[in-house]
Each structure stands twice: as structure tokens, then as C-alpha cells.
Amino acid sequence: MSEADDLALARWEVATLTGRLRWVEDERDAAVRDRDRNVELVTALRRSRSYRLGRALVDLARDPVRTGPALAGQACRRLRRRPPAKPRRKPPAGPVPARVYVAVGLDHPASHALIRALRQRILVDGDHLPVVVTDQPALRGLQVPGVVLEYLPDPRTWSRHDPGADWEALLAGRIAQLCRDHRACRAVVVDPRDPPSLARLLEPPTY
């Protein structure tokens, strides 16, 4: 294991963490916007007919003798006009969370072996959707059932395309976008010198 390989892996891990943190910050900002929107909805609700009905029920609880007959008559008129309620259907189960695998620097056989192991992994335990970031041209455009492949040019190819560009910044941006698109719960970097086997992929995550 060379020092250059260790340094490259560390840079990829930092870029992956940066992308993941960007998505977390976006989710936080979205939560703040949702909170503000909920405040607006509560304000609108207080002005609505439903809120007025709730206030009437409170009045009924406070003074049932005076308020009860009027409310009963209104409720009967609403029930006569209301169509029969349809049975509720159970909501469909939500999609499984995604997990991003940054698999750059692997050669052709190792890349295919990783995709095959991930495919077998979800057949054994489909607890997540694998999203694989690969710089292997042979995998570009490949369709694998149950696995999402995202092609990213390797640093050398990207430097020819855009000299002076920061490839790690490109990786961080792509990780943030994938986490946003697929609601990823984790993002991990695959060491190209030691890609995981099926047995290791089935082990519970340690972080």
C-alpha cells in the first residue's frame, strides 16, 4: 500500500463526507421552510370553518344545555348531505433507503465483481438501494436491476476535459445530488485495493 494511494483514498473520503454534509444541510434548511409553512397553515386553519366548528365544540363542553340543540341540528343536516365514507386503504410501504458506494479507482474485473456482489447482497437482504459511483467506462450506461449506477469520469480524464478543475469538488457535488435524489442514509468509499466481498457486504454497518 503506497502513501499516494492512502492520500487519494483520504481525499475521496473527505469529498464524500462533504457531499453528505451538504445534503444534510439542505435537509435542515428544508425543515426550517416546512416549519414556517406549517405556521402559515395554522394561521389559515384558525380562520377556517373547521376551526370555527372546533370552537363550537368547546362551547358545547362548557355549556351543553344552551349550545347542544343548535349543534345537533347542524350535525344532522351535514350527515344527510354527506356521502358514505369509503373504507381506508393502507398506505403502501415506502421505498427502502439508499446507500451510496463511491467505487472509483477499481479496474474492470473488480468493478464488475463489486456490482455482482451488491446485486447478490440485495437479493439476500433488500434493506437498501445501492447507488454506485463508478469511474469505470465499461459500466457507463449499464442497467443492473436493483442497483443504480452513476458514472463519473476519473480525475485524469476530467482534468483533460476541464484543466484546473477540482475533481474532489466534482465528487462532493455529485454525492450531494445523489443523496438528495435517492434519500441516501449512508455514503461509503470503497478501497480499490480491497473491495468488499458479498460476505463483507452482508455484515452490519459499523458506523
Image: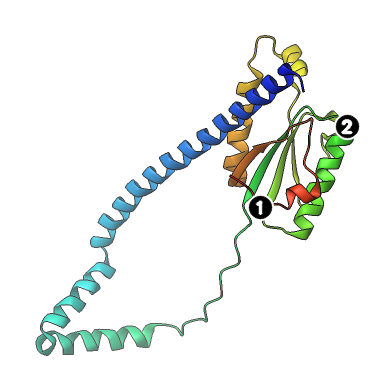
Question: Who is closer to the viewer here, 42 or 165?
Answer: 165
The picture quadrant where one finds residue 99 is top right
Q: Outermost residue, front direction? A: 1
Q: Outermost residue, top direction? A: 164
Query: Mark number for residue 99?
Result: none
Q: Secondary structure at mark 2?
A: helix
In the depicted structure, whether residue 55 falls above or below residue 114: below
Task: Name which of mark 1 and mark 2 comes first in the sequence.
Answer: 2
Q: Is residue 130 left or right of residue 88?
A: right
Which residue is drawn at the image coordinates 78% and 51% (left, top)? 199
Q: Outermost residue, right direction? A: 109
Which residue is drawn at the image coordinates 39% and 48% (left, top)? 34
| Residue 65, image x, y percentages | 11, 90
Closer to the eye: label 1 or 2: 1
Which residue is drawn at the image coordinates 64% and 14% (left, top)? 165
Circle 1 Cα neighbour tier, 10 Å, few/some/many (<14 / 14–19 / ≥20): few
| Residue 24, image x, y percentages | 49, 39
Q: Secondary structure at mark 1?
A: loop
Question: Who is closer to the viewer here, 162 or 155?
Answer: 155
The answer to whether residue 145 shows anywhere in this view is: no
Residue type at numbered disc 2: His
Location of the N terminus (image quadrant): top right
Query: Mark number for residue 108?
Result: 2
Which residue is drawn at the image coordinates 61% and 31% (left, top)? 16
Q: CA distance from mark 1 to mark 2?
A: 27 Å
Instruction: Determine which residue is flagged by label 1.
Output: 204
